[in-house]
Amino acid sequence: MGDFLIINNVTKTYLARRRTIADFILRRKIPYIRAVNGVSLRLDRGKTLVLLGESGSGKTTLGRLIVGLEKPDSGKILVDGEEVPYVGDKSYMRSKLRGKLQMVFQDPSSSLDPFMTIKDIVSEPLIKLHMPKNEILRMVIEALEMVGLDKSFLNRRPIELSGGQRQRIAIARAIVTRPELVVLDEPTSALDVSIQSQILNLLVKIQRELGLTYVFITHDARVARFIADYVAVMYLGKVVEYGSADDVFNEPLHPYTQALLSSVPKVGVRELPKTISGEVPSAINPPSGCAFWPRCPYAMNKCRNEEPQTKVINNREVRCHLY
Ligand code: SF4
């Protein structure tokens, strides 16, 4: 499904909590959480991959790994043939991908410094790239225009703006370096419903104009359906289904995908959506076998004991013993 973005067997673990002095003294072991567990995906340039799942599925960690804000414990991520550097490593400064990978966060109120001017916020990534000063202002104004704002915003501050305008500023800051790939982490979920579609349409327009590749993180199947070319459904750090948006939405194969998508009303069907029962189990102590079995209506004995491996069915990857 492409070779612009290649995620090859990536795993990322964290300590379940910070180590305290008492832990050292008592030699207590702290459990690990496998936030991302052996994920492999591929994507073509200019396409949108949606990472879909409930909170705790590992979507945001995978997004942060893709832009180098986290370092994988094992596995590799390549963009356009280059290994993604971790921002904390020395190799980052020499990497061709510097400035080419950007991320937009969920809540613009917390991701933008409320007291900085818009000019300073949007120019920050260009200053880090040592762009010439006379170029910076031109590029900032161009980025503002691309997100539907003008230079009258330059000296204003986020605190004076609406939620939708703030998210436009966050998008302008992400595209000002002319990146090749942008990770969008639930970019509309903190906004009013009336503003959400405006921002989604804006993102589609910018993608076409700049030829951007998007990795779009969401828990909302309706948003996923609107924006996705490809969908990777994640559950407890693993991809349980991956395929083209048309295939996944028209005929979801994995029981978890089926449950997530049942919340999207179908045209002409006047049926109340089913809700998915139970909660995502603890990542510290995940269920044995298939991690979804405690919530799965089709669970069999085998599901409790044996972890399903990825199978390819009609151009789709799916992890489930039903196939
Ligand atoms: Fe359900 Fe078993 Fe498939 Fe897991 S492997 S999704 S428990 S049927």
Image (cartoon, helix red, strand yellow):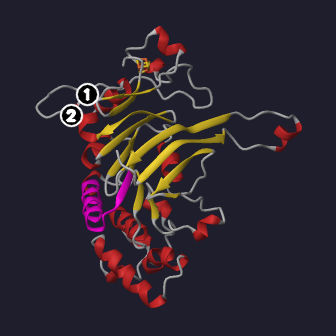
As drawn, 273 above or below 297: below
Q: What is the magenta range?
A: 196-215
- Picture coordinates of residue 193 (x, y %)? 28, 51
As drawn, 181 above or below 244: below
As drawn, 38 above or below 171: above
Name of the residue lying farthest toward the bottom: 134
Asked if the residue at tag 1 contacts the one at tag 2, i.e. Cβ–Cβ closer than 8 Å, the answer is yes
Residue plotted at (48% across, 37% down): 57
Left or right of 3 in this view: 272:
left
Q: Is tag 2's residue or tag 1's residue first in the polypeptide sequence?
A: 2
Could you say which is closer to the camera, residue 149 or residue 7?
7
Quarter of the rendering occupied by the N terminus: top left
The residue carrying mark 1 is 273
Res. 112 mark: none
Could you say which is closer to the camera, residue 189 or residue 139?
139
Q: Amino acid at mark 2?
A: Pro
Q: Is residue 255 magenta?
A: no
Q: Amino acid at mark 1?
A: Pro
The residue carrying mark 2 is 265
Element on which disc 2 rests? loop
